[in-house]
Image (spheres, rainbow, N blue to C red):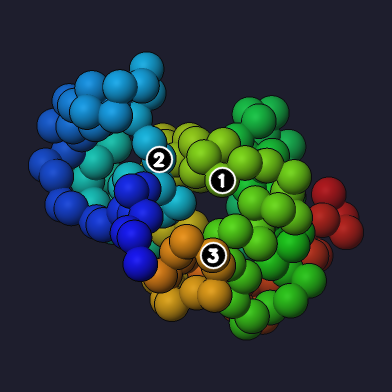
Amino acid sequence: MTEDPMQFISVPVPSQYVTQVYAYLAELTGTATPPVPPVPPAGMNSTADSPDDGKLPIVQWTVEDFRKLMIEPLGSVQTVARALDILAKQPDTRVSYTSLATQLGMEKKNLQGNLSAFTRTMHRHYKRRNWPMTWVEAPTNEPGLKSEFFYTMTATVAERWLTARAHG
């Protein structure tokens, strides 16, 4: 059995070196851009986006927050809004990263870019560090992957999201 050359492992990197590590990975792989594993964006549990992000509070998402989110014109935010639509239809159910990308009609690497941009928007404009959905890494049956991330929206948050959508 041969080992998949594109297996990924998580390696903690100080935030100030992330860009250089990406450049080094690109150099190693001989590509213009580094390979991107399907992981949540930097900043979800770290201070990767700015020194103040780790100080941001965890704040419950309200219907009013969701109304603001729905009208945000950034493409990344609208992609996450579509992901929230998917998760809200099946609250408290894990949806794999692969499944989410497929349902959104996106490549995994593009979804990751959108999630990263959403994190930055959430930090800057919503002054919070938590997403309206949660994620966990778990084993998967996805070919070529031992594990991947699964996203979940609680029933309470799903209800708020659906209320905002209905009255948006």
Residue 68 makes an appearance in the image: no
Give the alpha-carbon distance from disc 3 to disc 2, as whole Å.
17 Å
The label shown at residue 36 is 2
Residue plotted at (79% across, 65% down): 162
Return the mark for residue 53: none
Left of 129 or right of it: where is 54? left
User: Quick one: label 2, few (<14), some, or many (20+) residues within 10 Å?
Assistant: some
User: Which residue matches tag 3?
Assistant: 143
* Residue 55 % position (x, y): 22, 51
Q: Residue 148: x and y, percent?
A: 45, 65
- Name the residue carrying label 1: 108
130, above or below 31, in the image: below
What amino acid does circle 3 point to?
A: Pro
Callout 1 environment at 10 Å: few (<14), some (14 to 19), or many (20+)?
many
Q: Residue at x 37, y 17 (%)?
A: 32
Of the residues shown, which amino acid type is indicated by label 1?
Answer: Lys
Q: Amino acid at mark 2?
A: Val
- Label located before the other in sequence (3 or 2): 2
> Pointers 1 and 2 in contact (CB under 8 A)?
yes
Q: Nearer the viewer, residue 20 or 84?
A: 20
Q: On the rendered structure, is 18 left or right of 103?
A: left
